[in-house]
Amino acid sequence: MDSILIIGSAGSVGHGMMYLIASIGLPIKIVGTDVNEKKGEFEIEESLQIAHNLGHYPDLRFTKMDLFKIEETAETLREIKPKVICNLASLGSWWVTRLLPDGEYKKIGPIGPWLPNHLTLAYKLMQAVKMSGVDVKVVNGAIPDITNVVLGKVGLAPTCGGGNMDMGVHRLKRIVARDLGVPFQSVTIYGVGHHGTFYTKRLDGPYWVKILVGGEDVTKKYPNQKLMAMYHKAGYGASAQYEGAPVEQMRTSASFLNNVLAIYYDTRKTHVCVPAPNGLPGAYPARLSAEGAEVVLPGITLKEAIRINEEGAKIDGIEKVKDDGTVVFVDENVEYMRQVVGYHCKELKIEENEERAKELNRGLKRLYEKYKVA
């Protein structure tokens, strides 16, 4: 049986994916990988415990992987020959700035300037995939709305991502169904939008949706500003600060798993909102299959969808991505990072990522010490 390789299976999103896989009862083969061997093996055992309690017997196993070792990773890929890779590896999770006081968080919270934490390992993985010669589709979880764009500029674009605006669209599905008093399954919402709009601005930014209820187009009843107000009223606009790392990210795990399984089982289903298909910025409706991702836009042009997502990227501090993969950041975000973190970077070249990530995390460590973050 072909396998799915989950990189970062010991992390919080990987943990959720493993437990969901254990419970679905489908024929499947999973290889979990992580640099943390002890926790990675523990998660496999816990997942098997769940599966066996429910009467399921999936093929789950673990192997250690260090993405810094590109040649070793390539060799591991040749040995396993996975059909799909889900990459969840990062040098600093998306929530690390949320542990800071709210005033500081609001200045440096946009994810764009923190890109080196997410791009470094994804870049090494995609180099290893190319080196291995293995024909494999990659679902990237390291801020795909931005990372996949950079990788695409250098010919290493993952197939797609997961999470981000996909989660926003599914929240809107519940909001609209409750507003109209109809079953959840009767509502379908196709969405275009960037992580900046979804997360950083809580829908107070550019996005596009098409809303069908029982096959009827009701989009005009729900202009963006109305949807945003309903979104906030439902409690999705809160900017709560964590006292510690979030343990459960099951909703994120489900989004990624949905995309991974569509490729693995070759469903050819059109998903309502898929982040960064084929290196595009932001998210789009897309058909996923064993061949990859195909953008399917019901009622908006690709040019307009890209424009919306590029505007959303500016909310996250991304001015533009040059043709060689160099990222240009928004001046305001550059200045906040200089003031708060002691980090200055107007343009980021892809070969500078690793050293920039080290610099960022030294600055973050100083902030943690200053504010006594555990």
Image (tube, grey):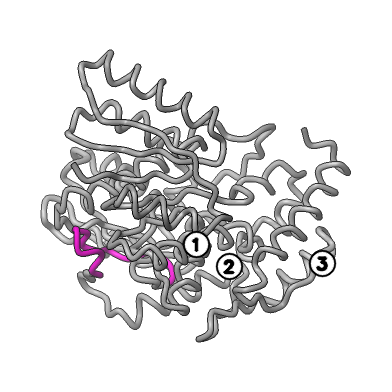
Callout 2 secondary element: helix
Q: Position of residue 197 (x, y in %)?
A: 50, 62
Q: Nearer the viewer, residue 155 or 234?
A: 155
Q: Residue furthest bottom?
A: 323
- In the picture of the structure, the residue carrying the numbered disc 1 is 197
- In the picture of the structure, the residue carrying the numbered disc 3 is 338
In 3D space, how far apart are the residues under numbered discs 3 and 1 (Cα atoms)? 24 Å
Q: Position of residue 46 (x, y in %)?
A: 41, 21
Q: Nearer the viewer, residue 364 or 339?
A: 364
Tag 3: amino acid: Arg
Q: Are marks 2 and 1 in contact (CB under 8 Å)?
A: yes
Tag nearer the camera, 2 or 3:
3
Could you tell which of marks 3 and 1 lies nearer the N-terminus?
Answer: 1
- In the picture of the structure, the residue carrying the numbered disc 2 is 315
Q: Position of residue 366 (x, y in %)?
A: 85, 49
- The relative height of residue 239 versus residue 207 in the rendered view (above or below) is above
Write down the quadrant of residue 180 in the picture: top left
Mark yes or no: residue 215 visible: yes
Q: Position of residue 123 (x, y in %)?
A: 52, 65
Tag 1: amino acid: Thr
Q: Residue at left 32%, top 47%?
A: 80
In 3D space, how far apart are the residues under numbered discs 2 and 1 (Cα atoms)? 7 Å
Quick one: label 2, few (<14), some, or many (20+) residues within 10 Å? many
Q: Nearer the viewer, residue 65 or 53?
A: 65
Left or right of 199 on screen, residue 133:
left
- The relative height of residue 198 versus residue 276 in the rendered view (above or below) is above
Question: Start and end of the magenta stretch?
Answer: 281-295
Quadrant position of the C terminus in the picture: top right
